[in-house]
Image (spheres, rainbow, N blue to C red):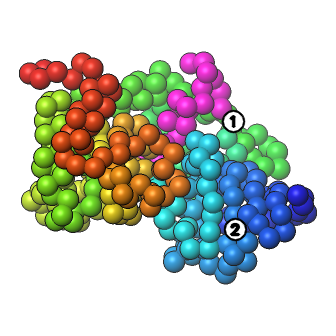
Amino acid sequence: MTTFPEDLTCPVCKSPAKSTGPSYGPFQIECERCGTYRLTYPALTATSLLKDSHQLYLLSAALRYHSFHKTSVLLEHDNGDELIRSIPIPNDLIDAIDLILWHFADNSNRYSSVITFTPDNDYPIAATHDGEEFKYVIDSAKEEGYLEVGDEMPYAEKRVDCQLTRSGWQRIRDIKDRRIISDQAFVAMSFDSTLNFIYDNAIYLALKSCNFNPYRIDRQHFSGKVDDMIISEIRKSGILIADFTQNKPGVYFEAGFAMGLKIPVIWTCRDTDMNAVHFDTNHFSHIVWNDASDFESKLKARIEALYPRQKKGK
């Protein structure tokens, strides 16, 4: 193993980083901003990791997200856009505030816990562009009454102490309660006509038998942008079924967005397609199916295990 120089810069955010690994890669990068991730040699030497280089801040958010969740990520020269699609991206300021509140919920071992943020390093937590925008989100959460915010510490790297208020904890609880109450189930899957039989005779029937109302975006009538409708309907859902048969990128995005909102995701895939499931998600417990009858029974059992009180007639 070779230890690389201390002055190595992260190829994503260009901040100082440490790296270990063989000279030919893959390397393990430790970056205060992007977290810990693995990197191939072609990615290290690539001139661009994304189709849109202005979205590097979102790639930092994706790497930080997976580092926090201890998901092993290998950044290659051509999978940056795919990594971005695998995580929840805020649609507006309220989404960004919620991401920070959830960060508190995930990191607080006491109701009175204080978390110190360094905006210049922690802005990927809320998928914001930079430290200044992250600080704006913190200040907005304070104005909403969700956070108590201390004065910035006058150090070389400005830091700020934050503590969840009673209203902040209530906000988290309200979001959880709305999702538990919701009987809508968002279904993310390939819309290939060959899979309609599986949806109609397995997914739909399993959800209805467990008193959920299935929602598949291609079977709805609406006006406006489809992306906005997808985000809106996932927010309204109490559960999301993510079927990775045919390995469609949209399913990764929709499952990642639901995870960020703490909406339970049930992972499924046809047995012949499991080998193609991306490394970001293949470690989750998938329902592997081979026909409609098999799929319906397995899915129904998984839903009932997650929602034992979701009875008919509720």
Q: Amino acid at mark 1?
A: Thr
Magenta part mainly helix, strand or loop?
A: helix
Camera-nearest residue between 36 and 136: 36
The local secondary structure at tag 2 comes to: loop
Camera-nearest residue between 114 and 231: 231
Disc 2 packing (10 Å; few <14; some 14–19; many ≥20): some
Q: Which residue is painted at 42% across and 29% down in the image?
A: 172
Tell me if 204 is positioned left or right of 162 in this view: left
Disc 1 packing (10 Å; few <14; some 14–19; many ≥20): some
Q: Is residue 111 magenta?
A: yes
Q: Amino acid at mark 2?
A: Thr
Which residues fall within the magenta stretch? 91-115
Which quarter of the rendered picture does the N terminus lie within? Answer: bottom right
Question: Which one is earlier in the sequence, the residue at label 2 or at label 1?
Answer: 2
Q: Position of residue 266 (x, y in %)?
A: 35, 40
Tell me if 121 is positioned left or right of 288 in this view: right
Residue at which label 2 appears: 40
Residue ranking furthest to the bottom: 47
Q: Which residue is painted at 67% across and 41% down in the image?
A: 117
Q: Position of residue 215 (x, y in %)?
A: 18, 47
- Check residue 116 in the rendering and tell me which mark sits there, or answer none: 1
CA distance separating discs 2 and 1: 32 Å
Q: Is residue 230 magenta?
A: no
Discs 2, 1 touching: Cβ within 8 Å = no
Residue 59 visible, this orientation: yes
